[in-house]
Image (tube, helix red, strand yellow):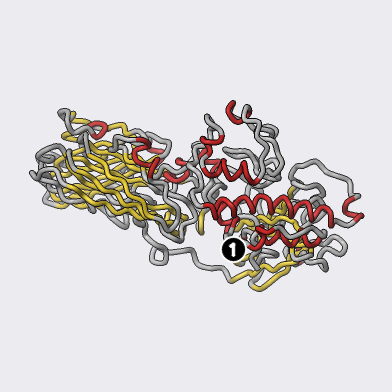
Amino acid sequence: MRLGLCAAAAMAALVIGLAVPAWADDTVDGAAVFRKCQACHSIEPGVNKLGPSLDNVFGRKAASMPSFHYSQAMEQSKLTWDADSLDKFLTHPSDLVPGTRMTFGGLSQPADRAAVIQFLRGNAAQVAAAAAAATPTAAAAPATAKAEAPAAADPSVPAGYIPDVKYTLRSGIAEGRMVFIGFGGTIDGVVNPGLKAAAGDVVQVTLINGEGAAHNIVFAQQGPNGQDLASEQVREKGSSTSAVFRAKTAGTIAYFCSLPGHRLAGMEGKVAIAAKAAPVTSAEARDISMDPAKVPAPVGKRGPATLRVDLKTVEVDGQLADGTTYRYWTFNGTVPGPMLRARVGDTVQVFITNDPDSAMVHSVDFHAVTGPGGGAAFLQVEPGQTKQLDFKALVPGLYVCHCATPMVAHHIASGMYGMILVEPEGGLPPVDHEFYVMQGEIYTSAAFGQHGAQEFSVDKLLAERPEYFVFNGAVGALTKQHMMHAKVGESVRIFMGVGGPNFTSSFHVIGEIFDRVYEWGNVTSPPLLGVQTVSVPPGGAVITEFTARVPGRYLLVDHALSRLERGLLGFIMVDGAPQPDLFKPYSAASGAGH
């Protein structure tokens, strides 16, 4: 069963004879609301991220978490966290603590604030109840340091392994018994959750001691010669250990705590091992990549007008590479989102809707907007809601737009970026082909090239160590799904931007020289002429133009060419008759070079 931590706290209170709090029957899922906070905060003891751990936050003085560097404003606030102060802070952080570094705009819905407060209070109640219910033998066990115990490892798993499947469980008390409780992902809050793997998968399960009694975790028949594989014991609240094994043949096995009486007391679950599945194929995964040919029509000679733009923020599992999927956050289901086109003087009406199934608040910041946050300050949209903003397009140019909900870099790295072109009066000169290309980075826990569903890594994001560099959202987006085409003699214009969030692009088309470059997306100054490579910073854009003069395959790259090995490549295929006056080879093309 799925156990919301509000219910868990109520159960824990009953175990030790406390009154059940009135909030325990609230139907809002506090754990689901807390997922909006997980990029910056954990509820694991002593585990700080961008923000401090919220473990046992109730009754704690503000700015008191060891080893975390707080803002001066928070240090001087003299707050003690309780339901009232948390509600005020979550409503609008800077109103309660002016100068706080927390940039999140707050939770506008009282039910969401109440639910996440109950979630945090329920976590504390659960831990307290479990400690009180611990057996005298376990309570008397010698304490160990709050460090990770050595992992129990199957000898068939090589050193330096990359797990195919990862789960985290916490020990706790629920329904009046000792249990494992899922932490994070699809098992979050589930009591003795059913775990899944495929035969041959390397499975890593981390056990966190949630309440102070000694525990371990054992996986039946997953050790050498079919023996049980048991982890080290974790004896102190907050300590952890891991068990790592290669899933054997298909079937169902048990996992349990082998300390005397604990399995009978309720600490037992199942692992379903399926036959090894074939890697996800292109045909089976959703293509989120934007077709670069989907460029809105030029504005031409028309005068100023009022335009309506509809954006929908959608969280979707999409194809990152062959055999690899990733949880993207998108505008309108693609990466990048739709390219928008206006002219100077237009009034743009933006309607942004957050899909009801979204787990996160989302927003949009237009670099073309003159106003607070590029509009994002007023467009933080809860799941299921719609907000509107009107703005006047004042300055011609090519501009990036992106989600600006904290942690902003997380939202951008998940795919939430796009561009808007504001044409000058009279429009841009006509060309034969226009293409829309954006570069981005993706930060996965597993290394580049691993198959299966990939998880986002906040640690790699903060360290600026992406596993993937991509054009238009995915490996192969511009070489397989959406190759670009032109003919000899035709003119080509590329609207190119960098969503990022961190790396500058040295944009280059191998085998071409840009006839004209509108540097930084500036269309009011004369373009540069005869340019080989152009730098485009994160959040920046450029317009490049060239005439296709010789047939063949031309490569779009970032000339920091190591990134090509991490997926960053596009093709323009130019068809037509050979042009020996311009390019005359005397041997057949080889597989070497570009």
Seen in the image, is 24 located left or right of residue 332?
right
According to the picture, the residue beneath numbered tag 1 turns out to be: 27
Measured as percent of width and height from the top left, residue 282 is found at 39, 62
Q: Nearer the viewer, residue 205 or 337?
A: 337
400 lies above or below 133? above
Image location (x, y in percent) of residue 79: 65, 34
How many marks overall? 1
Measured from the top left, where is residue 74 in percent x and y?
A: 60, 31
Q: Residue furthest left?
A: 301
Q: Residue at x 65, y 68 (%)?
A: 1
**Residue 22: quarter of image:** bottom right
| Left or right of 561, for residue 554 | left
Measuring 26% from the left and 36% from the top, which residue is drawn there?
542
Residue 199 picture location, percent across and down:
61, 67
Towards the viewer: 483 or 391: 391
Residue 421 appears in which quarter of the rendering? Answer: top left
> Could you tell me which secondary element the residue under label 1 belongs to?
loop
Query: Is any atom of residue 538 visible in this view?
Result: yes
Question: Is residue 225 visible in the rendered structure shown here?
Answer: no
Tell me the quarter of the image containing the C terminus. Answer: top left
Q: Amino acid at mark 1?
A: Thr
Image point 66% across, 31% down: which residue?
78
- Above or below residue 346? Residue 290 is below
> With respect to residue 327, does 379 lie above or below?
above
* 10 Å crowding of disc 1: few (<14), some (14-19), many (20+): few
- Residue at horizontal 8%, vertical 44%? 301
